[in-house]
Image (cartoon, grey):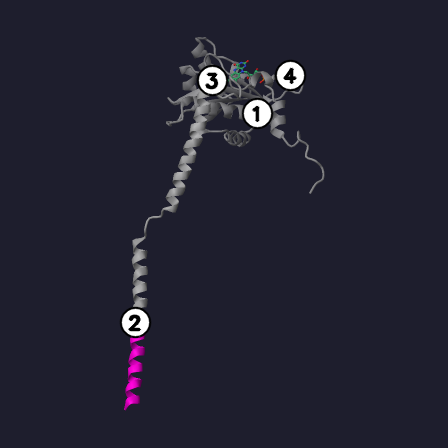
Amino acid sequence: MSDAAPDAELARPALEAVRARRSWSKVTDAAPTHAELVTLVSAAGRVADHSSLRPWRIIELRGDDRRVLGAAIAKAEGDAKPSTKPLRAPLVIAVVASYRHSKVPRWEQEAVASGVAHVLSLLLDEAGWGVFWRTGSYTRSKAVAKAHGLGKDEELLGWLYVGGKPERSRPSRRKAVDAHSHVSRMPGGAALPDELVHWRKDSAKAAAKKKKAKKGKKAKKPTDWVAKAEKAERKAQKAERKAQKAAQRAEKTRARAATTVE
Ligand SMILES: Cc1cc2nc3c(=O)[nH]c(=O)nc-3n(C[C@H](O)[C@H](O)[C@H](O)COP(=O)(O)O)c2cc1C
């Protein structure tokens, strides 16, 4: 056993990775390979997912795929020239919410797809890639949906623009998160309102009653009539054997008495 105490910070790489993450609006032409992307997507897909519906998919846009997106954006915006926005990064990842027919509502499924996008963006950042999640007024337009080949139960959540992190970039101006102002308790604090106090007492009483009834049921077992009949038969057979033995003994005594008299 090591006597060195584990370093709390080093032992929590996820905490460190999330703290260090930032968006990169400008990236270089370097990009993760398809294989690397697939590895990260399989990890990102481990987010909490009600009924494991996997209600999402990823579309990888590289090379001229980005020009197709540029043309669709122009169509959606009514512009004559194709948009050059998608050319800002060598890899553009479209994140799609693919809603499944299920009792799980759409908003929950969208939350899962959104979680995948966030975790994927974090994993890419941790792997050394620059990422920027972008959207626009055209994100859910018909022209853009058609360019991506979306189904009728699919919606885009935007694109992760991915590339190399430029070596000389300005230090990040991210504001710290004031967690205290985002964490609170329910209104009314820990004091239970009257109706809940009664409800708690009533439910405790009901639970005790149920427990008692269950115990009573256990003690009063139903009669096993077959076992009872078998036991009675065994008793009768034993009594019969006893009577036979007594009769044999009496017979022997009578025979002995007769010989003595002769
Ligand atoms: C769903 C979604 C869409 C976004 N769309 C845009 C966008 O179109 N343009 C933009 O400047 N930032 C957009 N952002 C915000 C950036 O991706 C980024 O989070 C922001 O610039 C803050 O930088 P930081 O991540 O380093 O804190 C979007 C974020 C999310 C989650």
Segment colored magenta: 244-262
Q: Which residue is mark 2?
A: 243
Quarter, ligand 1 = top right
Disc 3: CA contacts within 10 A as few (<14), some (14-19) or many (>=20):
many
**Disc 2 or disc 3, which is closer to the eye?**
2
> Mark 2 to mark 3: distance in Å?
105 Å
Give the amino acid type for the residue marked by disc 3 in the picture.
Leu
Q: Is residue 253 magenta?
A: yes
Q: Farthest residue in the bottom direction?
A: 262
- Compared across the picture, whether 46 is left or right of 19 comes to left
Q: Quadrant of the C terminus?
A: bottom left
Q: Which residue is mark 4?
A: 172
**Of marks 3 and 1, which one's residue comes earlier in the chain?**
3
Residue pictured at 56% horizontal, 22% vertical = 162
- Compared across the picture, whether 75 is left or right of 177 comes to left
Residue 111 or residue 182, whichever sits in front: 182
- Compared across the picture, whether 234 is left or right of 109 comes to left
Residue 122's label in the rendered image is 1
Q: Quadrant of residue 151?
A: top left
**Disc 3 or disc 4, which is closer to the eye?**
4
**Disc 2 or disc 1, which is closer to the eye?**
2
Predominant secondary structure, magenta span: helix
Give the x, y percent position of residue 79. 45, 8
Q: Which residue is mark 3?
A: 69
Give the x, y percent position of residue 190. 53, 21
Residue pictured at 28% horizontal, 80% vertical = 251
> Mark 4 to mark 1: distance in Å?
16 Å
**Of marks 2 and 3, which one's residue comes earlier in the chain?**
3
**Of marks 4 and 1, which one's residue comes earlier in the chain?**
1
Tell me the element at label 3. helix
